[in-house]
Image: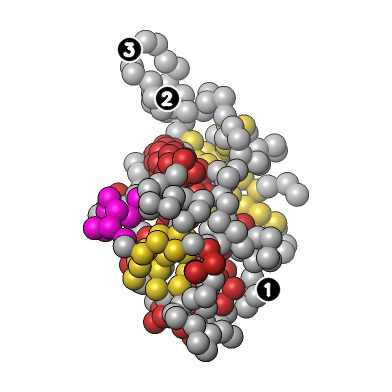
Amino acid sequence: MLECRSAAAICLVAVVLIGFDPWSLVFNNVPGFLYLFPGDSVGGAEKLLIKEELALYTGAAGSPGLYVALLGQVFDVQKGKKHYGPGGSYSFLAGKDASRAYVTGDFSKNGLVEDVSGLSPSEMLTLQEWLSFYKKNYILVGKLVGQFYDENGEPTAAAKEAKAAVEEGLKLKGQQEEQKKHFPSCNSEWTSTSGTRVWCSQKSGGIERDWTGVPRKMYTPGSEGHRCVCVRTTGLPTGHSGSSEYSNRGDLDNPKLQEYEGCPPDSEWCMLKD
């Protein structure tokens, strides 16, 4: 399992091994969903450990226990010993805070670190999801003195920055979900004989609606590449107040959209060129 190179790989095995999917959580419905300050949300965590102390909790013979830390919060994962203990698939996470690796998938010595500086808000939101996963399945026993908590157990500047990044990630996620309602993804299929076909329906992208739309490329600032979206061809443009004149072309004139080369602009489907 050590050859897994992404946090998604850990997530997949977690789903299989303990039947819980951390990605399925809807955090606005989870009490105290911002767990970066455990004293504020779970009644206070009493233990304060330094790195040298935490390093003893590997589950090996003579070890005082089996702990894993994430974003400075320490969890007793003894009930998951076959996974986190010696010889387990995730034994490299025991006795340390390896927060960065949950996102990067770098499980080397240099990658198993607590430093999360430079991670994007979306990546920090992924860490928040993992934190909620541990909260649900294991026991929070304390805090790790270092990157996120000082010797008094108070949040550091890094912890506050992490919390702000998570909040920004939640905001961006909400914006993306709202965008997908107005610009649902296309259906697509590929065959060795015909190549890739994209098309729109009144249920494409998992969004039920009373219009079908036409396929277009959508480019989002800050993102690489584009995604195929279904675009309304009549009515007010998205975000239009209706207080001024409009062309009754729906969202066809949105500057983030581009037609597929070689496809009729009013067609509900398109064969993509390689």
Residue 227 spot, x, y in % from top left: 58, 43
Determine the residue positioned at 65% across, 38% down: 260
Identify residue type, mark 1.
Answer: Glu
Which quarter shows the N terminus?
Answer: bottom right
* Residue 80: percent from left, percent from top: 43, 80
> Are there few (<14), some (14-19), or many (20+) residues within 10 Å of tag 3?
few
What's the CA distance linking mark 2 and mark 3?
12 Å
Which residue has dot 1 on it?
Answer: 3
Question: Looking at the image, which residue sits at the far bottom?
Answer: 61
Q: What's the residue at 38%, 53% (across, down)?
A: 153
User: Residue 266's spot in the image, x, y percent?
Assistant: 55, 34
Residue found 40% across the figure and 68% down from its top: 75
Image coordinates for residue 50, horizontal then vertical, percent: 49, 62
- Badge 2 crowding class, 10 Å Cα cut-off, few under 14, some 14 to 19, many 20 or more, is many
Q: Which mark is residue 156?
A: none
Q: Main secondary structure of the magenta part?
A: loop
Residue 237: mark: 2
Question: Which residue position is annotated with label 3?
Answer: 243
Mark 2 to mark 1 CA distance (whole Å): 48 Å
The stretch of residues the image draws in magenta is 35-45
**Image quarter for residue 164?**
top left
| Residue 132 higher or lower than 230, as above or below | below
* Numbered disc 2: secondary structure: loop
